[in-house]
Amino acid sequence: MNRIAGVLRRTFGIARDHVGTDTLGNKYYLIPEQKTWTGRLVRAKRMVVAANPNEYEYIEGSIPMEWDAWIRGRRKEPPSVEELLKNDSYREHIKLKAKEVEEKELALQAKEYEEGLVATPAKTVAKGHAATTSFGKQEISEDPTSTANTFQPGSWMPNPKK
């Protein structure tokens, strides 16, 4: 019986077992280890049929992390529905906690600024580019300056007569 199933599988194409479907509609399959008609052993493969088959429309997160780990062979068993729901709720919980911590931190920072415990960040505006030799200087220097391949001559003023 097994031999007949193998012949039919090889004759009509590769048999694949549907393993699961995620919430986005992607379908996951396992192609079992099998022998070709020449007797060569073909190892088992895992594959996904995307709900959105256009490659250019793929965005990060189109495949859940748990399914991605199964496809890449980092886990042996495909994820269960309960595991996926548990992980999604955990991620949402972490996002809410992070938002709360960020709001508390901003409130504490504002309070420290008001009380004068922490100096407010200085808002400086510098003219020119940081790579120039005159960056941040208000006056032109009398001494010549150079940085790498640039040379800035100093301004020359005649000596006052004594």
Image (spheres, rainbow, N blue to C red):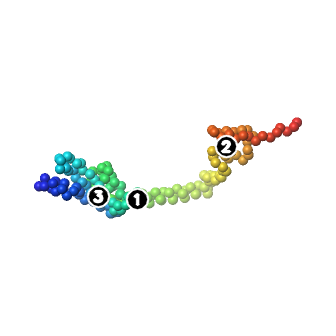
* Residue 37 x %, y %: 17, 50
User: For the residues marked 1 and 3, what is the alpha-carbon distance in whole angstroms?
Assistant: 20 Å
Q: Residue furthest toward the right?
A: 162
Q: Earlier in the sequence, mark 1 or mark 3?
A: 3
Q: Are marks 2 and 1 in contact (CB under 8 Å)?
A: no
Residue nearest the viewer, comparing 135 with 158: 158
* Residue 75 x %, y %: 30, 50
Identified by mark 3, the residue type is: Tyr
Secondary structure under tag 1 reads: helix
Label placed on residue 56: 1
Pair 2/1: label in front: 1
Secondary structure under tag 3 reads: strand
| As drawn, 10 above or below 148 | below
- Disc 3 packing (10 Å; few <14; some 14–19; many ≥20): many
Residue ID at (23%, 57%): 17
Quadrant in the rendering for residue 113:
bottom right
Residue ID at (87%, 37%): 161
For residue 54, say whether it is visible: yes
Residue ID at (63%, 44%): 131
| As drawn, 133 above or below 65 | above
* Residue 147 x %, y %: 64, 39
Q: Which corner quadrant holds the N terminus?
A: bottom left
Label placed on residue 35: none
Identified by mark 1, the residue type is: Tyr
Judging by the rendered image, the residue that carries numbered circle 3 is 28
User: For the residues marked 3 and 2, what is the alpha-carbon distance in whole angstroms?
Assistant: 61 Å
- Disc 1 packing (10 Å; few <14; some 14–19; many ≥20): few
- Disc 2 packing (10 Å; few <14; some 14–19; many ≥20): some
Judging by the rendered image, the residue that carries numbered circle 2 is 133
Identified by mark 2, the residue type is: Thr
Describe residue 5's horizontal placement relative to residue 23 as left or right: left
Q: Earlier in the sequence, mark 2 or mark 1?
A: 1
